[in-house]
């Protein structure tokens, strides 16, 4: 055994040993086949799945962003609509309010006019009544007084009233 | 082996004989340490990567992450960067090459194993042989035998008289220099690295057993340097695994393009 190794020791380190060439080739080929069959496809699968997962995530995020943008747009539009609606309602209310005020004012004026007209007419009537009653009263009193003074009965209705009228006219003129 | 040398009259420096290890068991050329280490590396690499890749989860666990990182390094930084389009079909080969060389190199500094199989030139020869076969096969398949050989021998875009000089150089490069440099670079690095560790650690051992006190005191420095060189070796081992894979990828890329 020892002699064999002494013989081998003389071999140059650059000369390959046949056994090592054979084992090396088989070992490398075997490792290659094992790695190619069981390892590299699995790693590639994991890489592909990962890439897909990341890409899917990005796409999902993009979709969500798009949806959010759309929702925002619709909300903004709705808000603008609501604002327009509110402005319209406010404008209508203002117009209506003004109309109501105008209406009420007209009514009040009418009422006032009516009341003042009624007052006028009632005053006028009172006055007429007062004048006519006064006229009768004054006439009677004056005639009574005159007949007492003159001693002359002014029985004649026509004359009596003419005299009274003339008197009153004079009275009014002198006023 | 060293203990017997120490007993001798003086320090016997490590030599190429230290690389010829007896069979671990039996009396067969197939049970030597480097051969068993190579087989062990195949088993370890297979188990590790099968376990790491088994789940192929989208969110990797620790094991899968480590396995994937190594695979992704070969796939992206070596195959994709260098070969480019259509690189995927060469990834299994480059991945096998990288892990095989890396693990066998690192065996050189793993306690108890402590032997880089690639310091036996037969293994680098085999690897360079595979690489050589693959890149020529790709070139012939892609461009046809005649066009491929013509592309190598007569570099396009060069004045005619330059062929006198260039044709022999190009032919030698493609058919002789490339496989030889590919294998010898790996072999020589591992061989020299292991020899260096033997010198410092063997030297330290010798000094420790020397009768002079002075030598005993100095021996830790030799051991210390041996440890420092171990770290350095680790770097070289990784680098060499990277380089042989890188060069193989470059050769494949060269064979794939029409003009090189």
Image (cartoon, coloured by chain):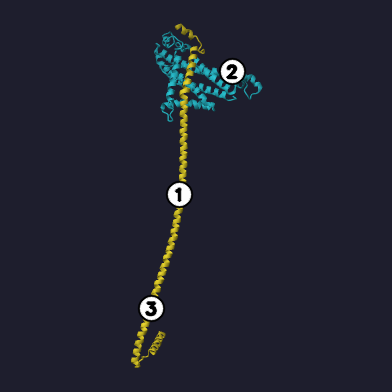
Chain colours: A yellow, B cyan
What residue occupies the far right of the structure in this picture? B161
Q: Secondary structure at mark 2?
A: helix
Q: Image check: B147 left or right of A106?
A: right
Q: CA distance from mark 1 to mark 2?
A: 81 Å
Mark 3–mark 1 contact, CB under 8 Å?
A: no
Q: Secondary structure at mark 3?
A: helix
Q: Secondary structure at mark 1?
A: helix
Location of the C terminus of chain A (image quadrant) = bottom left
Q: Position of residue B19 (x, y in %)?
A: 46, 13
Q: Position of residue B132 (x, y in %)?
A: 54, 19
The dot on residue B238 is none
Chain letter of disc 1 in the image: A
Chain letter of disc 2 in the image: B
Q: Is residue B161 above or below residue A59?
A: above
Quarter residue B229 falls in: top left
Residue behind mark 3: A125
Dot 1: few (<14), some (14–19), or many (≥20) neighbours within 10 Å?
A: few
Chain letter of disc 3 in the image: A
Q: CA distance from mark 2 to mark 3?
A: 148 Å
Dot 3: few (<14), some (14–19), or many (≥20) neighbours within 10 Å?
A: few
Residue behind mark 2: B172
Mark 1–mark 2 contact, CB under 8 Å?
A: no
Q: Position of residue B92 (x, y in %)?
A: 49, 23
Pointer 3 or 1: first along the chain: 1
Location of the N terminus of chain A (image quadrant) = top left
Residue behind mark 1: A78
Dot 2: few (<14), some (14–19), or many (≥20) neighbours within 10 Å?
A: some
Q: Position of residue B15 (x, y in %)?
A: 47, 12
Marks 3, 1 in one chain? yes
Callout in the foreground (3, 1): 3
Q: CA distance from mark 3 to mark 1?
A: 68 Å
Callout in the foreground (1, 2): 1
């Amino acid at each position: 055994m020892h002699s064999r190794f002494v013989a081998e020791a003389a071999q140059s380190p650059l000369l390959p040993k046949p056994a090592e060439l054979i084992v090396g080739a088989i070992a490398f080929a075997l490792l290659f086949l094992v790695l190619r069959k069981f390892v590299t496809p699995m790693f590639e699968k994991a890489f592909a799945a990962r890439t897909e997962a990341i890409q899917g995530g990005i796409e999902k995020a993009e979709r969500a962003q798009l949806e959010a943008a759309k929702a925002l747009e619709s909300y903004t539009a709705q808000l603008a609509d609501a604002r327009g609606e509110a402005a319209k309602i406010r404008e209508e209310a203002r117009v209506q309010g003004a109309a109501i005020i105008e209406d009420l004012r007209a009514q009040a004026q009418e009422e006032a006019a009516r009341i003042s007209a009624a007052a006028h007419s009632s005053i006028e009537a009172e006055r007429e009544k007062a004048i006519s009653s006064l006229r009768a009263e004054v006439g009677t009193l004056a005639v009574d007084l005159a007949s007492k003074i003159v001693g002359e009965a002014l029985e004649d209705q026509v004359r009596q009233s003419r005299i009274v009228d003339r008197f009153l006219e004079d009275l009014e003129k002198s006023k | 082996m060293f203990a017997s040398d120490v007993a001798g009259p003086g320090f016997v420096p490590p030599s190429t004989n230290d690389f010829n290890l007896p069979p671990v068991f039996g009396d067969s050329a197939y049970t030597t340490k480097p051969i068993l280490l190579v087989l062990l590396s195949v088993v370890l690499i297979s188990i590790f990567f099968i376990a790491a890749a088994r789940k192929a989860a989208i969110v990797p666990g620790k094991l899968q992450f480590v396995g994937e990182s190594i695979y992704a390094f070969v796939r992206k930084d070596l195959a994709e960067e260098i070969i480019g389009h259509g690189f995927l079909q060469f990834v299994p080969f480059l991945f096998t090459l990288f892990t095989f060389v890396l693990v066998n190199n690192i065996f050189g500094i793993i306690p108890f194993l402590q032997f880089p199989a690639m310091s036996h030139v037969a293994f680098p020869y085999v690897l360079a042989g595979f690489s050589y076969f693959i890149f020529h096969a790709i070139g012939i398949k892609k461009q046809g035998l005649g066009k491929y050989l013509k592309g190598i021998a007569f570099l396009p875009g060069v004045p005619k008289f330059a062929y006198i000089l260039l044709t022999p150089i190009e032919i030698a490069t493609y058919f002789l220099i490339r496989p030889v440099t590919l294998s010898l670079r790996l072999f020589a690095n591992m061989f020299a690295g292991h020899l260096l560790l033997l010198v410092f650690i063997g030297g330290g051992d010798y000094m420790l057993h020397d009768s002079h006190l002075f030598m005993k005191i100095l021996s830790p420095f030799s051991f210390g340097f041996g440890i420092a060189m171990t770290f350095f070796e680790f770097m070289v081992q990784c680098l060499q695994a990277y380089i042989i894979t890188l060069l193989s990828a470059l050769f494949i890329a060269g064979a794939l393009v029409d003009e090189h």
